[in-house]
Each structure stands twice: as structure tokens, then as C-alpha cells.
Amino acid sequence: MTEKSNEGLIPSVDGATTRLGGSPVASENHSVTSGEQGGNILNDFQLIEKLAHFDRERIPERVVHAKGSGAFGELHITEDVTKYTKAALFQPGTVTPMLARFSTVAGEQGSPDLWRDVRGFSLKFYTTEGNYDIVGNNTPVFFIRDGIKFPDFIHSQKRLPGSGLRDADMQWDFWTRTPESAHQVTYLMGDRGIPKGFRHMDGFGSHTYQWINEAGEPVWVKYHFKTQQGWEYFTNEESAAISNADYSRQDLYEAIERGDFPRWDVKVQIMPIADAEDYRWNPFDLTKTWSQKDYPLIPVGYFELNQNPRNFFAQIEQAAFSPSNLVPGVGFSPDKMLQARGFSYPDTQRYRLGANFEQLPVNRPVCPVNSYAQDGAATHQFNDADQPVYSPNRHSRAAGYLDDGTSSASGVTYGPATDLYVNPDPHGRDLMRAAYVHHRDDDDFIQAGILVREVLDDAARERLANNIADAMDGVSDQVELQVYEYFNRVDGWLGNRVREIFTARK
């Protein structure tokens, strides 16, 4: 693991400083002027280079999940799940180097990391078969189930274009007009909304993925990461009393520095392919969970974070995660949000970091890379001159593992794209703008109601109602009524209690 966290580190150099091209610098303190009190000259190349590089130190921050922190570690597989997946990183006894990044969703880089918000939970595994990324949250569900709604959702959580201020009215207006958000909003307004630092929260892959075993047999899978540090949270009042905007970042960093390495148990839920067709809720809907009574958690192993970044910008800010980073034995599902993120995540990294972002040390796989991609800004890895730059070719350089490498017009039909996922019943092949297939118990409010009535105790329900009322501060009269109706559909007691608390404060 030390090798990955040190990759890109410049060795310490004795002697005078140099320019970026390696030539010695005469002075870091006095620029060159025309006479003692004259103007600076353009031929003071160190002055120009120093200021020009400084002016370009910042890159575009992530549109979402901008404020975050992370660390390196290892994934340890302690159980045998080979009957479900052939993926190398999940084989018994395997230890895989990894990087984790935790974040808030709506805030900018300088925003407090104790705002009430969903927390991002992103994992990059440097496997022998390529990088595998799991990009999830600290909740098992999300606000929406179709990626086309994502820009609207994020706009509603960001800032007004005029005042530049966040606005409760537009947040609640979007949520209450998007009923599928009810389950996630109930989680957000509950205790999970302000975890006591990144170490004290669970993580989830959230989406439904697919595992495929050596025999080519698929199952549907959901990832759960259970904190061994204990699940803890702050109340609104407790978080507001903390002036440290970097509380969670500092807590994670200092714990690792003192050798208190945080760990999470890795568990999965497995659903047979046949069950998905008639499960009580659509199993690919990101706003729904699978009942653990129906599909219990299966232990896989654990991961430990034990190495802080050597350089925050290079290794955390430039870390690029995407669900499209798949490995053999792992696939997608018909989850529309997952499929949209598979495009959007690497696309935003190309915008932030450039077309060659995967050549950066923190994103570079530990296995060999053989690609016909070439050139572009910041290219610093390249193929030897004797290697052809096109496929197919008359040389020995290969094509895809299904290609014959001889002709691009072989006429061979490869069949289903099993490297993405095995779907025995795709419900037709016509291009459609369709809603999710409705299952017998599908309803946007039913699981949020179960969460309130069957999971939370009385004290947690009361905190939930108060947190909702707190978050409504600033809503218009119309949106206020929308919120009451929204939570009445979640649970009658909750809707009435929110009304009581909020109207008493007006």
C-alpha cells in the first residue's frame, strides 16, 4: 500500500531551488527590476513562472461532492463468495490496495462538513484486473431514480442565481414535487443527516449491481459497509456549536495519524436473478431498499484505512471515481441512475482533470494498461514508437478479447454484452422513455413510512420531526403546505407533528 500512496512523490533534493525545467533559481525573494525602483521585466522568468503557475493552482471543483476527505488502505476478503463472483478482488484471502473518499453533497470546497446532508462514500480498489470503483453514499437509497432529473435536483440544493444563497423553499419545492425523494429525505432529516465524522457512518453501494461467477451465472448484489467504530451522529444544536468547518476531515486524518485505523465490515445482499422479476419492489429502483428479512447480509471481509495522503490535492482532490470502472465478475443492472452515472462521472473528470486523468498516479491502475488512446493535454505515458496506433493492424498488437485482431469486418455477432451485465429478460429492445416497471408494493412513500414506524424509536421520531421543521425555515406558505402533505403520505403522525412544531415557531 505504501507504494501506491507514495506514487508521484518527488524525492527530497539538496541545494538551491530550481525552475520547473530544472535550471537553478537565483532568488525566491527578489524579482528583477529596471534599476532599484523601476518596473519588473518580462525576462525575469522565475517571477513569471512562479506567478503564472500560482494563478493556475486551482482546478474546477466537483459540481457535486466538492467538500471531502480521504485516505488509502486495504480491502481484506475473509469469506468465500466465489459461488457468486469471479472478480479477483473478492477471492478468499485477497488483499487489495484501495483509496476511500468521503464527502458532503451540496456544499462547496470551503463549506462546513457538518452540514445536514447526505455523505458520499466512494471506494477505489486497485485490483489485478484494473480499477474497480464503488461510488455510493451513507444511505442505502437516493432522492431520484432517473439520471435525467439529477441536474434539477442538484440545482435545487445549491444556491439561488441572484443572491448566491441556499434556499429552503426551492429545496422543499423540488422534494415535495418529486415523491420518489420521500425515502431519502426521511433518512436525511433523521440521525444519519449529520454523522459524527466520516469514521462513524455506514456506507452503501446504494445501486443494484451484478456479480457473475466463473460459470457465467449472474446474481444481483447490493453492497453494505458497516463501521466498526460505532454509528454516531450529531444533533442540529451540537453541529451548530462546532465552529470547525473541517471537523470530519480533521477527525479522519488525526485518527489515522495516531494509528487508530478505521475499519468497515464489507457485506452484501444477494438476490437470485429470477427473484427480481416479481419482487415486491422494483429491485433496480435507487429509491428503494431490499428487505434484509428477504435477503440477509452476507459477510465478505473488511477494509481498513491506514495511510493518509502525502499530498491532499494530488491524491484526494485529483482522485477520480466512476461506476464505469468495472472488473470481470462485476456488472451493471437496469438501474437508470447507475447507467447515467456511468457516463456522467468520467465525463466530469475529463472536464476537471483533462482527457488523461487516469494517467495521474492516484488514478493509475496497478495492472498493465494497453490502449489505443493517445495524445491530449498532460500526456505523460505513451507507447513505444514501434507500436501501431490503430486496430486491427498487421502487427502483433491485440484488439479486444472477443476480436480476432485480423479484420474489423469479420461478420461475427458477439451476442449479449456480458462484460456490462447479464440480463435474461430485458423487457423488450425498443428504445423507450419509460417509467420503472411497477411491482406489486411499489409506492414512493411506503418504505419511508416503514423507516419511521418500524426502524426509528420514539426519540428518533421526535428528532426527525424537529429536524424537518428546522430545515423548513424560510419556506413560502405554499411550499409549507406541500411539506405537510408530503410527510402525511409518509406517516400521518409525522406530518401532523411537523405541522405542530413548525406552526408553533412561526
Image: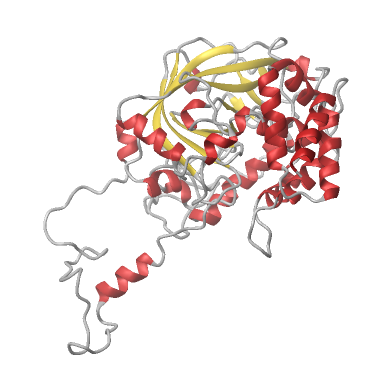
Q: Quadrant of the N terminus?
A: top left
- Expressed as whole percent of the image width and height from the top left, the position of residue 320 reads 50, 44
Q: Is residue 170 left or right of residue 191?
A: right
Front residue of this view, candidates 336 and 259:
259
Residue at 82 percent of width and 24 percent of height:
493
On the image, the x and y values in percent for residue 271 come to 70, 15
Q: Taking 420 as reference, is 478 above or below it?
A: below
The quadrant of the rendering that contains the C terminus is: top right
Indicate how the structure is coloured in the image.
secondary structure
At 79% from the left edge and 47% from the top edge, which residue is drawn?
173
Looking at this view, is 318 or 373 the one in front?
A: 318
- 348 shown above or below 426: below
For residue 141, what is the image quadrant? top right
> Can the viewer see residue 434?
yes
Q: Position of residue 170 (x, y in %)?
A: 75, 51
Image spot of residue 206 (x, y percent): 64, 29
Q: Would residue 256 be found to the left or right of residue 15 on screen? A: right
Image quadrant assignment for residue 69: top left
Say whether residue 427 is visible.
no
